[in-house]
Amino acid sequence: MRKYVLRRLVLAIPVLLLSSVIVFGLMRVMPGDALIALMGESGNIGERELAHVRRQLRLDLPYHEQYGLWLWQLVTLRPGDSIFTGEPITVSLGKAIPVTLELAALALLLGLVIAVPIGVISATRQDSAPDYVGRVVAVSGLSLPDFWLATLVITFAALWFHWIPPIGYTSLWESPLRNLQQFLLPAAVLGFRLSAATMRMTRSTVLEVLREDYVRTAWAKGLAGRIVVYKHALKNALIPVVTIVGGQLGVLLAGTFVVESIFALPGMGRLTVEAILYRDYPVVQTNVMLVAITLVTLNLLVDVSYAWLDPRIRYR
Amino acid sequence: MSAVIPRVATLPEQPAAEKVSRARQLWEAARRKPLGAVSAALIVVLVLTALFADVLAPYDPLAPQPDIRLSAPSREHPFGTDDIGRDVFSRIIHGARISLWVGLLAVGIGTAAGMLIGLVCGYCEGRVDMILQRFMDAVQAIPGLVLALAIVSVLRPNTTNAMIAIAIVIIPGNSRIVRGAVLSAKQHHYVEAAQAIGCRHPRIIAGHILPNVTAPILIIASIWLGNAILIEATLSFLGVGTQPPTPSWGLMLSSTGRAFMEQAPWLAIFPGLAISLAVLAFNLFGDTLRDAWDPKLRNRS
């Protein structure tokens, strides 16, 4: 097991280094001076700040030195300041990351709470009305754009219930109720989108497992249906579901970008989208790289947990 | 030889002599799965709408009529009007153009580039394959939407650049699928035979490997079309894709749809419905293609 983890770690490092080259290269497609001139043109910053920014970003250095410097800044966790607000990137990230983490965790939880029971019901009552309803919900979850769903949810909550989620962000420790009010709708929108694929996977794996011999044995020895399904079948059916959930972490992260912007939650996604709109590229490159690192790490964790659940994987 | 080829080219349950064409397989699948036929019909409607937008749209999508601003759906304006009195129905019809155009070009470029890389990787293997695939891993480490956002932030936000960004997002996944298909096609005896009689590489690739790769490419492309439309809408929604006043579904949703959602919910409902239907149609159609041509792909994508 330790060997497997080590091998995967060693493989992840070059991928991340290449990602950093891509992100860095992307940000330098346009010569730095042109980029900065563009920022000045859009009226975001004045001439004096421009000179300051040029110095601060070390655009006078050759590309490989700029890249080395940026990598060193990332590794030492000092990625510099935002051009637009002047705030150190670590400070704004420190504020934004907990918001996104809470949103993602809630969405993941809601997604599973929706997906697993419906998937199981869909499988145990194959080709019945509840099954069809479940499958239609799953397909629509894959096709409805999350930004549309979010817009509709806000609109109809306001129209029908005259309720608008409190604007801004209150931390969980400050006022748990207000915090929950702010997070419930965005998390539900994201969770619904996540639940689609999970639901489909749960349904098909439960269907498969229900046909296994040991499940037939469980039925034959007279166990109650509930126990057969939830204790015997579901346990094994959930293993592939873990990978599906893991594979969706990218969808989840990208989803937070959109949903945070709509619900005005000051998380990573909103921070990055705003940085992109203002061409605040130290922030953009740091955030995008951070997302890549998170995703690669999470995928690694998912693979390792999968290998732990199913030891056969380690030998592939 | 003659005993080998038919067995490879037909479905296992078919008698070896009877070759089943792809069109026939698709027809059979459409009969078994009516949803696939419905999605194909939806796509045809979408394409016709985009082609004949000028004829179909009852009003000019850009012409404001301030005296009827924010009017509810009626017989004259079936989807209502927006904040400066433009007809939403006409704007949605014209929006189909942007969505399809961006989708087709992005998927075309992304698929072609992905296919090329996949062919090179799968055919050459070895070091080239190793390096190119790690590069693809690195691109894939960044979620598609985030990568597209980053690309658009460097270029200027407009429809063309959104399209380029989407194309780049498509490349890695496509290259991987094509690579896999090429690797398995190389196992066939007739490829080995072609190598043995001294065929040149381009001839082996074009004559023996490509025909095996077209099905997965078409399947992935049709699924990606839906995604490309979704990403374009998302980018426009976030303000870094198509710019006003061009009617793009995502943009309509974000600019007027959100600002006036309480007075005029139709501004948010119809563009979103258009996006969902288009994406749903391509997803279902891709599913049907996959079931008809290559059921093995089901768990891979």
Image (cartoon, rainbow, N blue to C red):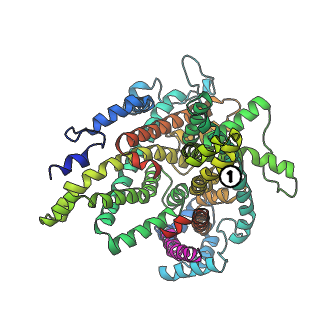
User: Mark 1 — residue?
Assistant: A108
Q: Nearer the viewer, residue A208 or B83?
A: A208
**x 19%, y 40%: residue:** B17
Q: Nearer the viewer, residue B277 or A105?
A: A105
Query: Is B56 part of what is drawn in magenta?
Result: no
Q: Residue B205, image x and y in percent?
A: 22, 59
| Residue A199: quadrant of the picture | top right
**Tag 1, which chain?**
A
Label 1 element class: helix
- The residue carrying pointer 1 sits among few (fewer than 14), some (14 to 19) or many (20 or more) residues within 10 Å by Cα, namely many
Q: Nearer the viewer, residue A69 or A280?
A: A69
Q: Residue B70, image x and y in percent?
A: 63, 27
Up the image or down, A2 lies above or below A285; here it is below
Up the image or down, B274 lies above or below A42; here it is above
**Res A88 seen here:** no
**x 28%, y 65%: residue:** B123
What secondary structure prevails in the magenta region? helix
On screen, residue A85 versus residue B170, left or right, reads right
On screen, residue B215 versus residue A135, left or right, reads left
Q: Which residues are magenta?
A: A1-24
Quadrant of the image containing the N terminus of chain A: bottom right
Query: Is A6 part of what is drawn in magenta?
Result: yes
Up the image or down, B53 lies above or below B14; here it is above
On screen, residue A236 versus residue B275, left or right, reads right
